[in-house]
Amino acid sequence: MGVNSKLDDGNHILMWDFDKLPLESVEDALKIIQVRYFLSDIHILETNKEEHNYIAYCFTRTEWQRAIEIIAATYGIDFQFLRLSVYRGWFTLRVGAKKSGTPHLVKRLEGYCLADVEPSELTSWVEYETLDRS
């Protein structure tokens, strides 16, 4: 299963996808973006320990064009994720299990404001398909 970023009011939460990047690099990149855009807490989840794959969520309500600007400005972002998101008009991240396991929280970066979206507001879910790269 996957969750989409689009909220009922047309805004989005922020979502990032990082492949083959050490956790420290992911943290550093997100801290820079968090300060630059005055974001709430960012939650980093590990999706594959061996390959250093991570995803991240920020529950700050953001207009789509601004969301794309923020994600595109993030060092190390998976450009395939960004490209598909722009094409679709929303971000989608896997929340269910895969061969590498279920995404799990590894770090929370304390934000500079309070989140203005509750996870329960995420009402757009999809059956998520990924490429088998083995």
Image: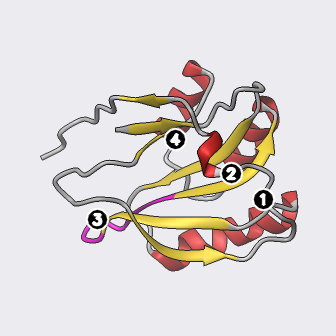
Q: Which residue is mark 2?
A: 118
Secondary element at image label 2: loop
| Picture mark count | 4
- Amino acid identity at mark 2: Glu
Q: Earlier in the sequence, mark 1 or mark 3?
A: 3
Local crowd size for mark 4, using a 10 Å CA cut-off: few (<14), some (14–19), many (≥20)? some
Q: Name the residue at 22% across, 50% down.
A: 98
The stretch of residues the image draws in magenta is: 49-55
Q: Are marks 2 and 1 in contact (CB under 8 Å)?
A: yes
Q: Which residue is mark 3?
A: 51
How far across and how far down the image is residue 111, in percent? 78, 71
Q: Could you tell me residue 105's position as x and y percent?
A: 46, 70
Considering the image in quadrants, where does the N terminus appear? top left
How far, Cα to Cα, is label 1 from label 4? 26 Å
Q: Report the residue marked by disc 4.
A: 79
Asked if disc 3 and disc 2 are in contact, CB closer than 8 Å, the reply is no
